[in-house]
Image: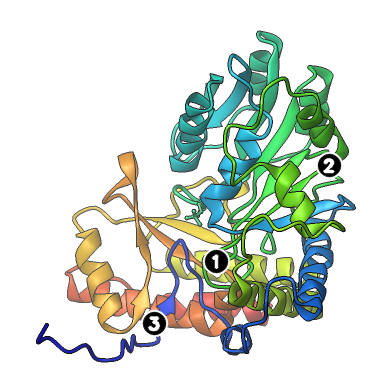
Amino acid sequence: MNKSYERFQPPKRVLLGPGPSPVDDRVLSAMAAPVLGHLDPLFLQCMDDVQALLRYVFETENRVTVPISATGSAGMEAALVNIIEPGDEVVVCINGVFGERMRDIIERAGGTPIVVEAKWGEAIDPRKIESALKSSKPRALSLVHAETSTGVLQDLSGLGEMAHECGALLIVDAVTSLAGHPVGVDRNGIDICYSGTQKCIGAPPGLSPITFNERALDRIRSRKSKVQSWYLDITMVERYWGDDRTYHHTAPISMNYALREALRLIHEEGLEARWARHELNHRALVAGVEAMGMSMAVAPEQRLWSLNAVSVPEGVDDAKVRGRLLEENIEIGGGLGPLKGRIWRIGLMGSGSTRENVRLVLDALHRALNAEGFECPTGVEAAEAVYEN
Ligand SMILES: *Cc1c(COP(=O)(O)O)cnc(C)c1O
């Protein structure tokens, strides 16, 4: 082979898309620490810290609270395959890409999805969820708290009781909400909840924190068949992370250093302060977007703070505007599925949710839109006014 390869040196982009989010330098440098053996007592201490800090972030007392060694989708798969046996019915809420993904996993695991839908860009009506639960004998109710493909927040209040009254477990995808919005696993009666490291947690992609309560573990213990996935069988993963320390797979050492440091940052900031920061920067961004004569794609009470869906103005080429932003090293996301070309997805997640980034993206959008022939005023002052009040 004659070709020589240079060291890969990516630029430092400002990641304001649907994830990954910007990674704090403290987290990046934690990853550069020496690799320990995965059963080294020092690494076991790191694992224990990660579990304790994850309980803090999930707001749970659940013993089984661990990072799955794979991305957020593996958390979704772990949540579902551990409880589904062939023939089980699962009520699944679909109003975007990630609800669709849940349905696919349910089918692959031999379950029968009972689908409750809403238009992409709208939350699911809880009355529809209730009637779906009552019309079947579901093993679980599965839904996405923060639908990253549309920017919609699903209100969790009352859903735990609703599911439990019908003998179903409540499974919640908190990939884009955990550490950016209140999730409150114990408070909301969530039986299984999972997330990903690269959204509001602020670490690189690679791990999927997940938590199971005793109700969920009881269900798993009473299974008649083995969990369909060897790798994601939580009863084995749990023995590795728990007191047994039985070898199951080799934990991704450096990623766990990164997660520990990202969680330490969250703990230092405090969950409530972090939620408030995400909310404030979201409100400032919305004020700026609206001052520019654009509108948000989601109704005010259903908007995510972490992922802002902005309607692409009539006549504007979505991809060209994103291309102009990328030339300035700013990444934002486009729409998916029915929303392709119709929305921009501006992520303000983790260490990316800052006043500076709100100003940066509004200013860059203003210039890009005017260059594309959509004349509009700047949104920066309207955003700044939100901070001044
Ligand atoms: C990003 C995301 C996932 C999938 O996570 P990956 O890390 O991409 O596998 C699942 N659910 C939601 C809501 C997400 O935003």
Single out the residue that lies furthest toward the left: 2
Percent x, y of residue 17 = 43, 66
As helix, strand or loop, the secondary structure at mark 2 comes to: loop
Which residue does the image show at 83% across and 28% down from the upper left? 161
Q: For mark 3, what is the residue?
A: 13
The quadrant in which residue 209 appears is bottom right
Amino acid identity at mark 1: Gln
Is ligand 1 closer than 8 angstroms to the Cβ of mark 2?
no
As helix, strand or loop, the secondary structure at mark 3 comes to: loop
Which label sits in the foreground, 3 or 2? 2
Q: Which class describes the residues within 10 Å of circle 2: few (<14), some (14-19), or many (20+)?
A: many
From the viewer's perspective, is residue 203 above or below residue 4?
above
Q: For mark 1, what is the residue?
A: 198
Q: For mark 2, what is the residue?
A: 213
Q: Which class describes the residues within 10 Å of circle 1: few (<14), some (14-19), or many (20+)?
A: many
Which residue does the image show at 79% across and 63% down from the upper left? 51
Percent x, y of residue 168 = 75, 23
Is ligand 1 closer than 8 angstroms to the Cβ of mark 1?
yes
From the viewer's perspective, is residue 267 above or below residue 95?
below
Percent x, y of residue 221 = 80, 30
Q: Return the residue nearer the eye: 195 or 307.
A: 195
Which label sits in the foreground, 2 or 1? 2
The reply to whether dot 2 and dot 1 touch (C-beta < 8 Å) is no
As helix, strand or loop, the secondary structure at mark 1 comes to: loop
Label located before the other in sequence (3 or 1): 3
Residue 147 shows up from this direction: no
